Image (cartoon, rainbow, N blue to C red):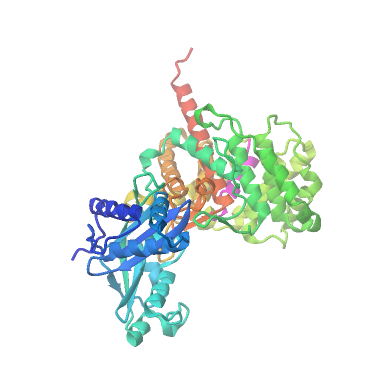
Amino acid sequence: MNLAPPAPVEAMRAYRQVDGWVRAFAVPEAAEPTSKPAAACVILRANGAVLGRGVAVDTTGQAVPRAVRAALTEARERLNLANDALADEHAREFAKNFSICLELSGALIPITPLTFAECDLELSQGLDGVAASVGGKTEALFPGWMLATASFASDALVSCIAAASGDPNLAIKVNPKSQPPQLAAEHGVTCYRFRATHLAQLAPDQEPIFLHRGGRIVSQRDITRATLIQFAADLNARLTGIREDGRTFQPLTSPYFSWKAQVAPSADPILDDSLRVLGMAVYSRAGVPSPAGKAKPAAVHEAVGALFERDFVVRKNSPLKDRPLHAAGYAAVAYAETLAADSAAQKPRDFDALGVDVALTGAFDVERGWSPRVEGPERAFIAYGLACWSAMPNLSEPERVKFRALAESAVRAVYRETKPNLLVGQMPWLGWAELIVSKGKAEIPASAVLREMRDVVWRHQLSVDDGGTDGPDLVGGIVFTASANPLPAWQSSRAVAFLASAMGDRRLTDPDERMRETVRMLAGLRFLRQLAVDDAAAYAAMDPLTAKWGIRASLWDQRQTPEATALTLIAVCEFLKGLDEATAARDQEKAPVK
């Protein structure tokens, strides 16, 4: 028995048949499908919205036509077509604008998990679909739909059991008496998993593409200096809300769910804004290229102005002296404005009037250490804020000396209280703070520790062999967890962002280490590029213009955040900067002595 889903050639033949039925808005009664999968899923979209969805499980070979009929029936209802002689003609006219998504399953493989939670560990998110049979009725959910609805395998299996049984309370994830073994014994429930071949149109008039985990696999060969320059511009556009062609949209200021076009309230708007502005500033500063010689949008100062205006009431009612973490965020924003300024001597906005300096000095004392108000996870970022403030151009020399000493002492305190194997969790903030306070020094005091941390990170980077046949899209990601099912996610951007800065610093990367670090960095950037919502990953987005180029939380979690996108932008910019500096240094070394 062939357990694999239909091969690409067979799947494409099935798509051609489905396309014909959809455009005609009818499936012949005696339709004989080209492909005979165990189950099929057809989704019809128009302008990003789902108009029709059909799923069918059929062992007689009728899964594809049944799924198309169900999708067309739902689309007809949603279009609310008049029941007259012209209804069919109108339906066919609407069908010209449908984008088709087709998933075809392999054989349904019975599984016997002890708990629903076990499904999430054993099944591959975004690759495995699930099904359940109860009393002769089988229901299935495909991986593409599970990705779109952010459903774990356990959630999807519970839904399948409820649909097949007609009882929404039969399977309850948290009830120990309602787990798969009990359901099998008492109600005859059989659970399945399956793999699927996934095709989708990016637009109604385009050929479909094959998707892997809801996207297209980014090849390592595609990560070049030119493509990274364009990637940086695209990431910056997502943060600013301005595309290169001048089109505008809602910038990424809080979590955004791309397939639903929904904005979620930010858990901490000030921190989200500070990271967003920092990413924009790094991109806009001198030395970071822009594609095709186009001028970079001067959006940093406008974003800072909007931040001040939006958060005025918050700051007025809750002084920063009680919120050192937010003070550090404002310090990062002030530093960002300095990076983006046309003149290094430009006086920044009146951040000092906010009491940033008072809040920061109250967060850490050289003699007494950290204030009780400062939680452990906040300390690296506050140390970074202190370092940023010490670099402000409008400080007097005594102030600069005071804040530099305070920042350096805070940095050393974070090193002392962090176990070496947990140091990567303090990145990039601790590393960037170290680079700021060590500016102008011949050596970086913590260079040995940072080099060791870098080696630990690279040991946890997934290789081609680690990815295997299921995970070529995971290659280059960093695994930070020792859980039973460790997979890389957006947190890779934290380590890669600092290591990109370290690659360009000769005190942390010797000339004979550059090639090795470049190769590792390119793999890391490949993974971050895979996390970005490109044209392929936006095939199901409600608003592709807004969704594109935000960094997803993971390859199976469509949530975009300002932090992940900003850190990825900084990583790309720092890598390009270090690459250009290394090239210039190498050319200088090779130049003949005059």
Q: Where residue 250 sits: x, y (%)?
A: 60, 47
* Residue 204 picture location, percent across and down: 40, 47
Q: In the displayed structure, does residue 2 sit left or right of residue 102?
A: left
The answer to whether 583 is drawn above or below residue 104 in the figure is above
The region drawn magenta spans 425-439
Q: Position of residue 560 (x, y in %)?
A: 53, 53
Which quadrant of the figure contains the N terminus? Answer: bottom left
The image quarter containing residue 45 is bottom left
Assess whether residue 482 is covered by the magenta stretch. Answer: no
Drawn side of residue 320 relative to residue 263, left or right: right
Q: Nearer the viewer, residue 42 or 51?
A: 51
| Residue at x-position 29% and y-position 79% | 136
Picture quadrant where residue 173 is located: bottom left
Q: Residue at horizontal 23%, vertical 65%?
A: 61
Q: Is residue 433 visible?
A: no
Is 429 covered by the magenta stretch? Answer: yes
In this rendering, the answer to whether 580 lies above or below 332 is above
Q: Residue at the location (73% across, 44% down)?
A: 403
Whether residue 326 is visible to the viewer of this picture, yes or no, is yes
